[in-house]
Image (spheres, rainbow, N blue to C red):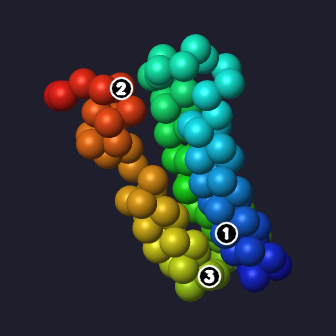
Amino acid sequence: LQLGAFMLSVLAIFGARLLTERMLSDQSVAAPGVRHPKQLYIATIIQCAAAELPILLALILLFLSRDIYGFIPFAIFSLAALTFFFPKKQKWADWLGVDF
């Protein structure tokens, strides 16, 4: 059960990454040269939600099994994913074409 939840977490994080990359590279919705901050905002929310999935699954497993040592790898993985997906100032500045 724990291995399945971990694999589901990994798939969700990589799936969110692929989805947001495709969403941000799709320029067919907007006119050429027009970039909407809404797209980057939605992509950031999707990535952060996927990064929180491991910790939510770990809490469910913790409540079911009462094993704290099964919780720790999920927590570390979730923190690493949140650190990786946290919106960076440079990414927003490049996307919007402004300097903060």
Q: Earlier in the sequence, mark 3 or mark 2?
A: 3
Give the position of the N terminus as an image quadrant.
bottom right
In the image, 97: left or right of 56?
left
Give me the C-alpha separation between circle 2 and circle 1: 30 Å
Q: Position of residue 8 (x, y in %)?
A: 76, 67
Q: Which residue is mark 1?
A: 10
Q: Name the residue type under label 1.
A: Val
Residue 96 numbered tag: 2
Q: Nearer the viewer, residue 76 or 48?
A: 48
Q: Secondary structure at mark 1?
A: helix
According to the image, label 3 marks what residue?
A: 70
Q: Say whether disc 2 or disc 1 marks the residue closer to the N-terminus.
A: 1
Badge 3: how crowded within 10 Å, few (<14), some, or many (20+)? some
On residue 37, the disc is none
Q: Residue 8 versus residue 73: which sits nearer the camera?
A: 8
Which amino acid type is shown beneath numbered disc 3?
Gly
